[in-house]
């Protein structure tokens, strides 16, 4: 099964499938195995990790529905999650935009110094035609893909939060956002740079620029985004 979740109900099997049990708020919600009418398929949810199929039960706020087989969180609604996700997405766009224009770090050794920005680091190999593909890939993974994901989330969630019908092609936009999630590596870039700088701190004087702290804040925002994102709730809202 792919690590990238799409619509959790899209992988629900048809009639004749057996249903497992799921835990909601610590208690077992058993689903009787047997045939499932086609009309009831919309009420099923499939675990994105182990493919176990359950009858969806909406938990209370701050409670979670967890896969009984692999303990993957399937449904985790949060109050005002839409507003918080929109705020996080806006912050991601602003931080990445500002980080590409401000210095990321400055290294000084032997009386010589050099400073670079995030975009400068991504384009470090652009002068060599043989490495142009690597340059474009690095720039996309740490700058363009995270920004695109944030914009897609804004496009999908803003009408829902405003109690309006979903935007045109909102389901395709959200599916694309989820497909891009493993390729959004801005936080991986920040953590990798931090580890590398610790190793060279004994050889040179390293000064962190504003962009480094922006990417550090970005790591926290990514964690917050994953905490408040209930993909089942988003898919359900897009079907209304």
Image (cartoon, helix red, strand yellow):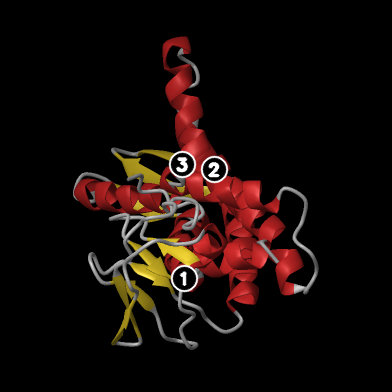
Mark 3 against mark 2, which lies toward the viewer?
2
Which residue carries the number 2 mark? Answer: 145
* First along the sequence among labels 1 and 3: 3
Q: Quadrant of the C terminus?
A: bottom right
Residue 107 point in image, percent of width and height = 36, 44
Between residue 57 and residue 74, name the one nearer to us. 57
Task: Say left or right for 103 vs 150.
Answer: left
Residue 224 has which mark? 1
Mark 1 against mark 3, which lies toward the viewer?
1
Label 1 to label 3: alpha-carbon separation: 31 Å
Which residue carries the number 3 mark? Answer: 115
Task: Say left or right for 64 vs 49.
Answer: right
Residue 32 has which mark? none
Label 3 to label 2: alpha-carbon separation: 25 Å
Q: Residue furthest right?
A: 164
Q: Residue at x 44, y 62 (%)?
A: 36
Q: Quadrant of the N terminus?
A: top left
């Amino acid at each position: 099964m792919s690590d990238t979740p799409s619509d959790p109900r899209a992988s629900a099997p048809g009639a004749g499938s057996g249903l497992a049990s799921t835990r909601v708020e610590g208690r077992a919600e058993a689903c009787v195995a047997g045939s499932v009418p086609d009309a009831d398929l919309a009420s099923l949810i499939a675990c994105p990790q182990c493919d176990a199929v359950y009858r969806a039960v909406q938990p209370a706020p701050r409670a979670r529905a967890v896969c009984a087989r692999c303990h993957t969180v399937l449904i985790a609604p949060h109050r005002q999650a839409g507003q918080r996700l929109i705020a996080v997405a806006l912050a991601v766009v602003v931080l990445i935009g500002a980080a590409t224009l401000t210095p990321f770090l400055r290294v000084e050794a032997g009386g010589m110094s050099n400073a670079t920005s995030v975009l400068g680091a991504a384009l470090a190999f652009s002068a060599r035609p043989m490495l142009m593909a690597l340059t474009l890939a690095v720039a996309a993974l740490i700058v363009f893909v995270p920004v695109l994901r944030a914009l897609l989330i804004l496009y999908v969630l803003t009408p829902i939060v405003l109690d309006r019908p979903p935007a045109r092609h909102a389901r395709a936009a959200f599916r694309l956002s989820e497909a891009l999630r493993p390729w959004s590596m801005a936080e991986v870039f920040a953590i990798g740079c931090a580890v590398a700088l610790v190793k060279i701190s004994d050889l040179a004087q390293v000064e962190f620029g504003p962009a480094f702290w922006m990417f550090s804040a970005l790591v926290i925002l990514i964690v917050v985004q994953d905490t408040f994102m209930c993909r089942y709730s988003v898919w359900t809202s897009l079907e209304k």
